């Protein structure tokens, strides 16, 4: 039987810890190694975890005294991981009891060329109320080789992934220079391995004010610079004009994000990368000028999203 290591990462998630950890302990799959990391939370998460781990001396608990970020925290736990498969699990989310069993069973149907699997998910609010599904029922897995698609399009729900330990070992873990891991892991792993999708919902992803995915970029946002560093890697990994086209699409998107969030340094970096593929389109010449003048356009972005949310979105939709 294959062992699964679930690396549980926590940062300021005290209200959700019990439900999250119990969802791991209540898995129907029998061979699970649990590793818990608290990344120097500012709330009482560390104390809550210690209380929940009483009577469970077999579960390693890494308590960072200084905030290291998700990537470094994960890498610390990875050194202790004994599983054939790895799950990177945030301790504000919730697993269905059959998640691990279903994912292992699915992985066992795939050959060694498949390194990562993912599934559908539901989003819940702070109270656990259902908001929406990540994928519609009509979603179909793209071709197994999805490197090019991952460059230009975010579509995988990161909390749903399980991957072979050999994948993350071959990659040398997460890149500790980065403030988030998803994009970098996707493109580096997809360059070498295939992905496969399960349509079932096995994970509830919690949306709350502290969730990274619920926030617009802010001025000085470290995630933007991390994305720039990943784009540099993609530039080196690309092997075709189609892949370069996907990167240009990504760069144009990140330029807009940077300019309209007043991240002028990152906007300049993304613009320089895009210039390497030829003359800038006219609209991006305008954005380059606005960025050079350091004009703060955050009010325009905020107004656009306000209008989109209040005037054009159906009342029944959740954000």
Image (tube, rainbow, N blue to C red):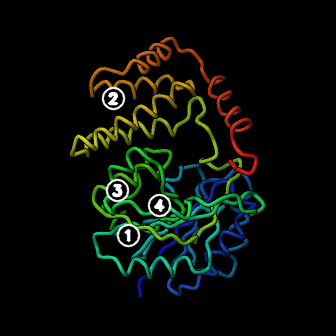
CA gap between label 4 and label 3 equals: 29 Å
Mark before the other along the chain sequence, 2 or 4: 4
Q: Quadrant of residue 232?
A: top left
Disc 1 crowd rating (10 Å Cα; few below 14, some 14-19, many 20+) is many
CA gap between label 2 and label 3 equals: 23 Å
Camera-nearest label, 2 or 3: 3
Where's residue 89, x and y in %?
A: 56, 64
Disc 1 designates what residue? 165
Disc 4 designates what residue? 76
Dot 1 falls on a residue whose secondary structure is helix
Mark before the other along the chain sequence, 1 or 2: 1
Disc 3 designates what residue? 146
Residue depicted at 68% across the width and 82% down the height: 55
Disc 2 designates what residue? 273
Dot 2 falls on a residue whose secondary structure is helix
Camera-nearest label, 4 or 3: 3
Between 59 and 311, the one nearer to me in the picture: 311
Q: Disc 1, disc 2: CB below 8 Å?
A: no
Camera-nearest label, 1 or 2: 2
Residue depicted at 66% across the width and 61% down the height: 92
């Amino acid at each position: 039987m294959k062992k699964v290591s679930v690396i549980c990462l926590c940062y300021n998630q005290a209200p959700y810890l019990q439900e999250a950890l119990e969802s791991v302990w209540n898995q129907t799959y029998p061979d699970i190694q649990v590793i818990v990391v608290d990344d120097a939370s500012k709330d009482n998460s560390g104390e809550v975890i210690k209380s929940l781990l009483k009577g469970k001396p077999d579960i390693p608990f890494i308590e960072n005294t200084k905030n290291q970020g998700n990537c470094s925290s994960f890498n610390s736990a990875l050194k202790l991981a004994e599983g054939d498969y790895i799950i990177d699990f945030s301790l504000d989310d919730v697993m269905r009891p059959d998640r691990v069993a279903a994912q292992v069973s699915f992985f066992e149907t795939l050959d060694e060329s498949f390194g990562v699997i993912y599934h559908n998910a539901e989003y819940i609010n702070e109270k656990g109320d259902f908001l929406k599904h990540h994928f519609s029922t009509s979603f179909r897995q793209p071709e197994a080789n999805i490197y090019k698609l991952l460059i230009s399009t975010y579509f995988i729900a990161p909390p749903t992934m399980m991957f072979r330990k050999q994948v993350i070992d071959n990659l040398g873990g997460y890149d500790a220079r980065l403030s988030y891991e998803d994009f970098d892991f996707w493109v580096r792993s997809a360059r070498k391995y295939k992905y496969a999708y399960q349509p079932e919902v096995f994970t509830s992803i919690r949306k709350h004010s502290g969730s990274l995915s619920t926030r617009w970029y802010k001025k000085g946002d470290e995630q933007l610079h991390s994305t720039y560093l990943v784009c540099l890697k993609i530039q080196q990994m690309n092997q075709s004009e189609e892949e370069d086209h996907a990167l240009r699409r990504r760069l144009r998107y990140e330029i807009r994000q940077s300019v309209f969030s007043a991240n002028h340094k990152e906007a300049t970096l993304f613009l320089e990368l895009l210039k390497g593929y030829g003359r800038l389109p006219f609209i991006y010449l305008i954005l380059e000028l606005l960025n050079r003048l350091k004009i703060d356009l955050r009010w325009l972005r905020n107004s656009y999203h306000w209008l989109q949310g209040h005037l054009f979105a159906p009342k029944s939709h959740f954000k």
